[in-house]
Amino acid sequence: MREVDGTVVFVEVRQRASASHGGAAASVTPTKQRRIVLAARHYLMRLKTLPPCRFDVLTLQGDETQWLRGAFTLDA
């Protein structure tokens, strides 16, 4: 996804039925973050110039939806 200002946004979508095991946001562990960052770097290295980028997490838990902008950084 790309913002109007040119920022590339990588979005991880996580769904959980309940928060009994920490919830949807808690399922984006440091290991998962590193995998997302590696995939993003792979994509970004194909571009001529490095655009600003951001990592967001969209959580779906029960009837609630939450968009966590800038949930983690490229150095994850």
Image (tube, rainbow, N blue to C red):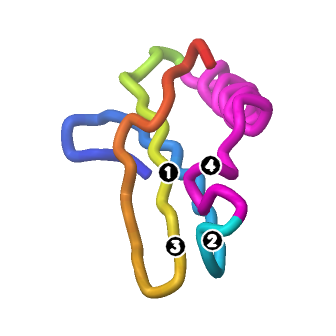
Chain-order first, disc 2 or disc 3? 2
The CA distance from mark 4 to mark 3 is: 12 Å
**Secondary structure mainly formed by the magenta segment:** helix
Badge 2 or badge 1: first in the primary sequence: 2
Mark identifier at residue 57: 1
Q: Helix, strand, or loop for circle 2?
A: strand
Of the residues tagged 4 and 3, which is closer to the observer? 4
Q: Amino acid at mark 1?
A: Val
Callout 2 crowding tier (Cα within 10 Å): few <14, some 14–19, many ≥20: some
Mark 2 vs mark 1, CA separation in Å: 11 Å
- Disc nearer the start of the sequence (4/2): 2
Q: CA distance from mark 4 to mark 2?
A: 11 Å
Tell me the number on the disc at residue 26.
4
> Which of the 4 image quadrants contains residue 24?
bottom right
Q: Give how far apart the Cα atoms at labels 1 and 4 are.
A: 11 Å
Q: Are marks 3 and 1 in contact (CB under 8 Å)?
A: no
Amino acid of disc 3: Leu
Residues in magenta?
A: 21-47
User: In front here: 20 or 43?
Assistant: 20
Q: Are marks 2 and 3 in contact (CB under 8 Å)?
A: yes
In depth, the one of 25 and 50 nearer the eye is 25
State the SS at label 3.
strand
Residue with the mark numbered 2: 15
Q: Which one is earlier in the sequence, the residue at label 1 or at label 4? A: 4
Q: Quadrant of residue 56?
A: top left
- Residue positioned 42% across, 33% down in the render: 54
Left or right: residue 10 versus residue 68 is right
Q: Nearer the viewer, residue 18 or 43?
A: 18
Question: Which residue ends up furthest to the bottom in the rendered image?
Answer: 63
